[in-house]
Amino acid sequence: MSIKFAAITPHPPVIIPTMGSSLDLRKTDQTRKSMQKIAELFIKSQPEIVILISPHGPVEYQEITINVSPDLLGNFEHFGNYKTYLNFKNDLEIVNSLHQQCLTQKTPVRLMEDPMLDHGALVPLYYLTQNYQKKVKVVPVAYSYPEKQINFDFGKIIFEVCNSEKNKEKNFAIIASGDLSHRLTSDAPAGFSPKGSEFDKQLIQSLDNNDVQTTLDINDNLIKEAGECGYLSIVILLGAIEQINKTRMFKNVKFKSLSYEAPFGVGYLVGYFKL
């Protein structure tokens, strides 16, 4: 199997040491340690290509979006940091394969060219690649909003492309970037809702139970009320995981949660799938 690594990561810029204050870094200690653990596992898996699902890239409401820019770069100047810069090459062969497979399976898709990576991509890539000796290629994608099934089906397409005859010798990583509820406390960015913690608990429990269907069945109104940004990223990843499970005779993929905390009223989940 060519998919060697799969993880769920948050993307608060304050967990980057050159950005967060000393207080921010203390408050996010669990998340930062878990991201360091994720990075260690990422390096052990030796990926060559990272398919990065971010909710903050060029998002089209009714279509999956795939970034076709050959050169990708980014910084955190928008957040007041002028020290940290990242740059990557895209893998346009993988982009083309994903696009063609979407067209074949009538999955709504749009190609967009934007060389600037958003913080949803940059934060996990900072941790994953800062100590990695290889120069990975990055394929940025973004989810579609209206239907869970479109995103789940796109995850299946990712699996098919990664495990196609021409790509089976390559090593892939899939990263679902996203924060959970933004409404966990009275001072949270989107205000408080008791539904925020309910959503986070349901999602994490379904992942811990390796119950894909229960994850997909989370109530749409609860998702909306939670004010999250990571759910559909996870749904795409689960589409790929479901296909991995179908190819195995005995042992299914298990999710391992490393940490969850919400120091600023936003839920930060870090975890990976044992492939």
Image (cartoon, helix red, strand yellow):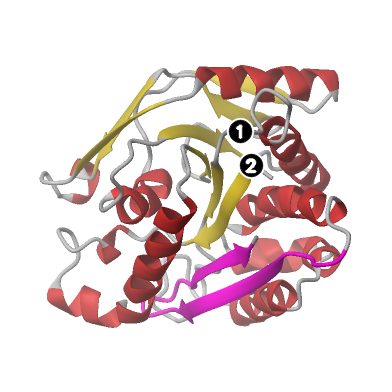
Identify the residue position indicated by label 1 in the image: 169
Report the magenta residues as a range.
Answer: 250-274
Q: Is residue 126 above or below residue 138?
A: below
Q: Is residue 196 left or right of residue 48?
A: right
The residue furthest front is 169
User: What percent of the width, then of the height, locates residue 259?
Assistant: 48, 79
- Is residue 183 among what the camera can see? yes
Q: Is residue 15 above or below residue 101?
A: below
Could you say whether the residue bearing mark 2 is in a helix, strand or loop?
loop
User: What percent of the width, then of the height, locates residue 196?
Assistant: 60, 75
252 in the magenta segment:
yes
Task: Give me the residue at 26% from left, 64% from top.
Answer: 14
Given residues 130 and 165, the one toward you in this image is 165
> Mark 2 touching mark 1, by CB under 8 A?
yes
The residue furthest left is 83
Q: Is residue 209 left or right of residue 66?
A: right
Task: Give me the residue at 78% from left, 18% from top.
Answer: 103
Q: Quadrant of residue 35?
A: bottom left
* Secondary structure mostly seen in the magenta stretch: strand
Task: Give me the residue at 76% from left, 24% from top.
Answer: 102
Q: Which mark is residue 2?
A: 2
